[in-house]
Image: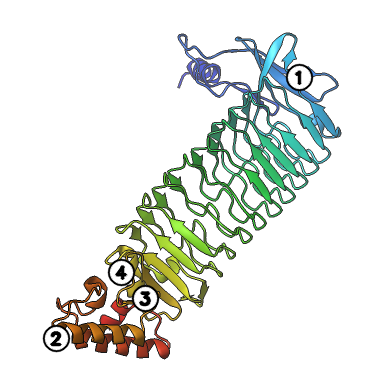
Amino acid sequence: MNIKKTTAIFASTVLVLGFAVGNCFISTKIQTADAAEPKVVDAYVNYGNGEFTYTVYSDNHIEICNGSKSKTISELTIPAKIDGKTVTEIDWYAFSENKNLTEVTLPNTLVDIGTGAFQECTALKSIKIPDSVQTIGDYAFMGDVALRDVSVSKKFANAGDSIFSKCIALETVEISDGATVIGESMFSDCRSLTKVTVPDSVKTIGKYAFDGCGKIESINIPKTLSMINESTFRNCKSLKSITIPETVMGIEENAFMGCSLIENVNIPKSVSEIGYGAFGDCANLKSITINNPSCDIYSLSSTICNAVVNYESKYNGLVVYGYRGSTAQKWVENYYYEKGLSFSALDGLFGDVNNDNKVDSKDAVLILKSYAENLAGVKTDIDKSVADVNGDGNVDSKDAVIVLKYYAETLTGFSGGIESYLKK
């Protein structure tokens, strides 16, 4: 190929794609003659005593670039304006791995905090994200192990992954009303986190967002949320209770796995799907109510269980509440052989004629009494839908025998409902 032609192609490519100076990437956007994107006016300009460098664009906004020379300073203030031009961006990894930085003041003109901008600033103790900030890139504050409190701006709408992941000293997080997103793995493995304020303006909580936050005791699940994503609250071992709003349509796999202090869960009728392991290994779970009769429940026993030992699900008196004939009942019946797991009908316990929430010899006696009265021509008010356990259209001695046999089975350890017994 002609050398002059090759050189011309290379030069034009650099002009189109941009170029890097030091750690500051000057332009990440393709520019054409008709493009509206701002162009670089001045690049890699030193600020103050070398705290950072910056780039000036043709629309008079400034991007903070390379802070590598500031690694000996402990306090950093980024101004709102430099030479009359507005600071709106912090570039990728601009101040990453600054081990001495303890305090940062960000301007209220800032819109975008780039990927890894303050990653592994291991001495940084607190950060307030100004209300002007709309976007925070991946890993922006990841691994800031001294960070104790965070305030997230009300305009925050674009979240990268793992923004505050592995901030192991982080204790409190306040997400301002108006913010719409909590990003994927945003606070994962923040093992000291105890208090999180989540406003109802939040519409999305990403996968693994609070995974491994073992000290959170309570958290608001916003009424604007439509999905509880994969592993969102996995291993939140101090979480004592949850309220799932009626806007939620699905609970994905492992969403609450390992939440060992939750005792009771009510899943609203709006939820149409419960994924694998969603409530697995919840050691103290006593009851779970599934209000949607046709909810799709992942067909493994570990989807809802108190423990998993050697790949086997274990139960400790866990009761699944649902409607007769529902997918919840069928799910329990699939695992009726599991000791400590039972189903209870929201529309009346099958065979529980006296409504004391158990099926035993007392119910058999009432069935026999009703049968005798019917034979004598005396009308009884027994609930046929509950008493006709064999489904033959009659309430008679056959039903009483089934109830007695079922009751005998429960005395020897059988924990399923009478419907499960009938299918043995």
Q: How many other residues sit within 10 Å of disc 4, few (<14), some (14-19) or many (≥20)?
A: some
Q: Quadrant of residue 415?
A: bottom left
Tell me if residue 39 comes above or below residue 206 in the rendering: above
Q: Nearer the viewer, residue 358 or 291?
A: 358
Dot 2 and dot 4 residues touching (CB under 8 Å)? no
The disc at residue 79 is 1
Tell me which label, 3 or 4, sits earlier in the chain.
Answer: 4
Q: Secondary structure at mark 2?
A: helix
Q: Which mark is on residue 335?
A: 3
Depth check, mark 1 against mark 2: the one in front is 2
Q: Residue at x 72, y 37 (%)?
A: 96
At 78% from the left and 31% from the top, the residue drawn is: 104
Dot label at residue 330:
4
Label 3 vs label 1: CA separation? 63 Å
For disc 3, the neighbor class at 10 Å (few under 14, some 14 to 19, many from 20) is: some
Q: Which residue is mark 2?
A: 375
Residue at 36% from the left image edge and 80% from the top image edge? 359
Mark 2 to mark 4 CA distance (whole Å): 35 Å
| Residue 15 in view in this figure | yes
The one nearer the camera, 282 or 370, is 370
